[in-house]
Image (cartoon, helix red, strand yellow):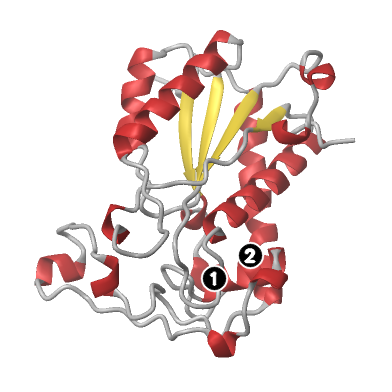
């Protein structure tokens, strides 16, 4: 029997009798992750985090449902990396609108985008979809920003570094090559000071900005670090899901006493 909080495992018999309160839409990417991690790393992490967070929330009585993960993200800076699959932001907007419209029409009024890819930026899309489909409340969780990675890892890294490698060693160790196969995750910063220090933004051309498509050294990664991080992460996300399921989205703001 499938898990009732995962739509892909659930039957119409279960769905039609369950009053789902929150839908979770995991959104990842398909891209190179150094030499040692699979192209589906973002999707594998997203699916695990969504499922485990939903399980914990379900056990607390929140009726959440995880939609199938969308496996393609914005990779416009990696168009020259073989088999990195790019989905344009305009395409993402159309997909998000259609999913939101379908959910709203079926009485599900709360949607959480669980984002697992740094190239995805849903803020402006949520503004536009919210104006077009006002019946649904949409929020975004970038799971890699929920916790301070320095509390769990010596050098978390930005992409295929210690954090992501540790996570995959816990979730799917059979898909991780020996760390002796990995590159160092060396990067090349911008020459311009504003871009280098972060108060100016420009997209990175990934083949020029990295040595091996990684950003961050995975050498100190362990499955134990990944397990501890993911346990803390999913507990925190589940707590938010429980709160969101119980809340009235028409009354989200606290009023200060006069």
Q: Which numbered mark, 2 or 1, is in the foreground of this view?
A: 1
Dots 2, 1 in contact, CB < 8 A: yes
| Quadrant where the image shows the C terminus | top left
Image position of 28 with respect to 220: above or below: above
148, 88: nearer the viewer: 88
Q: Secondary structure at mark 2?
A: helix
Among all residues in the image, which is located at the extreme right?
A: 1
- Badge 2: residue crowd in 10 Å (few <14, some 14–19, many ≥20): many
Q: To which quarter of the image does residue 88 belong?
A: top left
The answer to whether residue 164 shows anywhere in this view is yes
Q: Say which of 234 and 207 sits in front.
A: 207
Give the position of the N terminus as an image quadrant: top right
Q: Which numbered disc covers residue 229? A: 2
Q: Earlier in the sequence, mark 2 or mark 1?
A: 1
User: Which residue is at 47% across, 55% downward?
Assistant: 30
Q: Position of residue 34 (x, y in %)?
A: 46, 75
Q: Position of residue 214 (x, y in %)?
A: 41, 74
Is residue 252 at least partly visible in the picture? no
Helix, strand, or loop for circle 1? helix
What residue sits 39% from the left and 55% below the top?
Answer: 118
Residue at mark 2 to residue at mark 1: CA–CA distance? 9 Å
Q: Which mark is residue 163?
A: 1
Give the vertical position of 103 relative to 3 (above or below): above
Quadrant of res 9:
top right
Identified at 78% across, 13% down, the residue is 16
């Amino acid at each position: 029997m499938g898990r009732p909080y995962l739509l892909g495992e659930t039957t119409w018999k279960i769905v039609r009798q369950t009053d789902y309160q929150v839908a979770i839409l995991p959104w990842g990417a398909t891209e190179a992750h150094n030499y040692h991690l699979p192209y589906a790393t973002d999707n594998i992490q997203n699916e695990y985090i969504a499922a485990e967070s939903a399980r914990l929330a379900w056990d607390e009585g929140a009726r959440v449902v995880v939609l199938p993960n969308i496996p393609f993200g914005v990779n416009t800076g990696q168009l020259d990396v073989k088999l990195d699959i790019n989905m344009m932001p305009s395409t993402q907007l159309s997909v998000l609108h259609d999913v939101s419209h379908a959910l709203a029409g079926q009485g599900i009024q709360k949607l959480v985008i669980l984002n697992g890819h740094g190239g995805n930026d849903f803020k402006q899309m949520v503004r536009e979809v919210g104006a077009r489909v006002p019946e649904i409340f949409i929020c975004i969780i970038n799971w890699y920003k929920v916790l301070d990675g320095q509390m769990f890892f010596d050098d978390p890294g930005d992409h295929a570094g210690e954090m992501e490698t540790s996570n995959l060693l816990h979730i799917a160790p059979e898909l991780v090559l020996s760390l002796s196969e990995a590159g160092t995750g060396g990067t090349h910063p911008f020459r311009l000071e504003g871009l280098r220090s972060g108060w100016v933004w420009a997209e990175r051309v990934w083949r020029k900005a990295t040595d091996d498509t990684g950003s961050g050294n995975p050498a100190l990664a362990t499955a134990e670090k990944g397990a501890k991080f993911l346990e803390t992460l999913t507990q925190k996300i589940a707590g938010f899901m429980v709160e969101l399921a119980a809340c009235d989205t028409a009354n989200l703001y606290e009023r200060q006493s006069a």
